[in-house]
Image: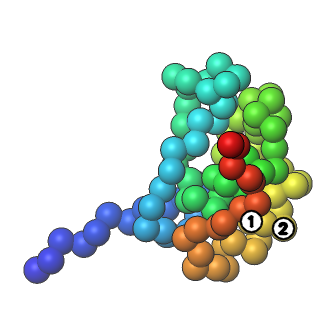
Amino acid sequence: MAKKEEELVCELCGREVQYLTRHHLVPREEGGRYGATAELCQPCHSTLHLTFSNRELALQYNSIPALQQAEDLQKYLKWVRSKRVERIYNRRGRKR
């Protein structure tokens, strides 16, 4: 009998995904290098950093419940929970 693969679940949207990324709940640039982290899917992780500044994440949205209740994320969370997306290609430009 084959061993069942470990189920990976995003802590923000609750979807089962193939890959997770580590999100520092207090961004490293704001002093959170050794602080608490959350395992998020790439779309959720990218959306957080596009939606909020590092300062906002550190001061207002430094826990999963706070992020899940953030007004600015409600439309996104409703949308992503019904999708099978693994990657979102965002509009952030590369610094040259």
Going 76% across and 34% down the picture, which residue do you hit? 54
Count of numbered badges drawn on the protein? 2
34 sits to left or right of 32: left
The residue pinned by badge 1 equals: 77
Could you tell me residue 88's position as x and y percent? 65, 67
The answer to whether residue 13 shows anywhere in this view is no
The one nearer the camera, 74 or 54, is: 54
Type of amino acid at the residue the image marks with label 1: Leu
- Secondary structure beneath disc 2? helix
Left or right? Give the position of 20 relative to 47: left
Q: Quick one: SS at disc 1?
A: helix
What's under tag 2, amino acid-wise? Lys
Residue count near mark 1 (Cα–Cα under 10 Å), binned few <14, some 14–19, many ≥20: some
Image quadrant in which the C terminus is located: top right
Please name the residue that numbered disc 2 is placed on. 75
Residue 95 position in % (x across, y down): 70, 43
Is residue 79 visible to the viewer in this orientation of the structure? yes
What colour scheme does the image use?
Answer: rainbow
Residue that lies at the very extreme toward the top in this rendered image: 31
At x 56% / y 53%, what residue is drawn? 40
List x then y, in percent, for residue 30.
Answer: 70, 23
Query: Callout 2 environment at 10 Å: few (<14), some (14 to 19), or many (20+)?
Result: few
**Percent x, y of residue 49:** 73, 47
Which is more toward the observer, 65 or 35? 35
Q: Are marks 2 and 1 in contact (CB under 8 Å)?
A: yes
Placement of the N terminus among the 4 image quadrants: bottom left
